[in-house]
Image (cartoon, rainbow, N blue to C red):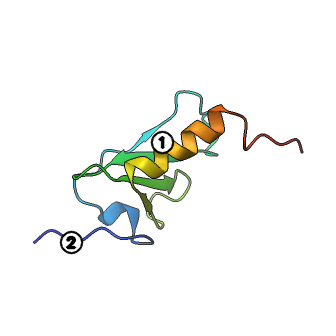
Amino acid sequence: MVQPVHNGMNANAIQNAVWRKSSHSGGNGNCVEIAVLDGGDVAVRNSRFPEGPALIYTKDEIAAFLAGAKGGEFDFTV
């Protein structure tokens, strides 16, 4: 039986998830990983805690976030 996917579930429990991280990741563990799920939703997890919770977004939500990031809406200085 396939377990339903929901926000906050253990990322390792998502069946058939193939996790990817950006080639821009510096390899220091400070990145997120994504997996496209059956049905088209996208799961996101913290690469330092792969067994931790996953956040689940629709394709439209991811597209809106990426458009904002590319447009500079989330730029900030520390």
The residue closer to the viewer here, 51 or 57, is 57
Q: Does residue 26 appear in the picture of this structure?
A: no
Q: Does residue 57 appear in the picture of this structure?
A: yes
- Report helix, strand or loop for mark 1: helix
Q: Is residue 25 above or below residue 46?
A: above
The x and y percentages for residue 29 are 61, 45
- Residue found 43% across the figure and 46% down from its top: 34
* Position of residue 3 in the picture relative to residue 76 (left or right): left
Dot label at residue 63: 1
- Residue found 35% across the figure and 61% down from its top: 12
* Position of residue 77 in the picture relative to residue 39 (left or right): right
Q: Is residue 58 above or below residue 2?
A: above
Q: Is residue 44 above or below residue 68?
A: below
Q: Amino acid at mark 2?
A: Gln
Dot label at residue 55: none
- Residue found 48% across the figure and 66% down from its top: 52
Residue on which disc 2 sits: 3
Quadrant in which the N terminus appears: bottom left
The residue closer to the viewer here, 17 or 5, is 5
Count of marks, rendered view? 2
- Report helix, strand or loop for mark 2: loop
Q: Image quadrant of residue 74?
A: top right
The x and y percentages for residue 62 are 48, 47
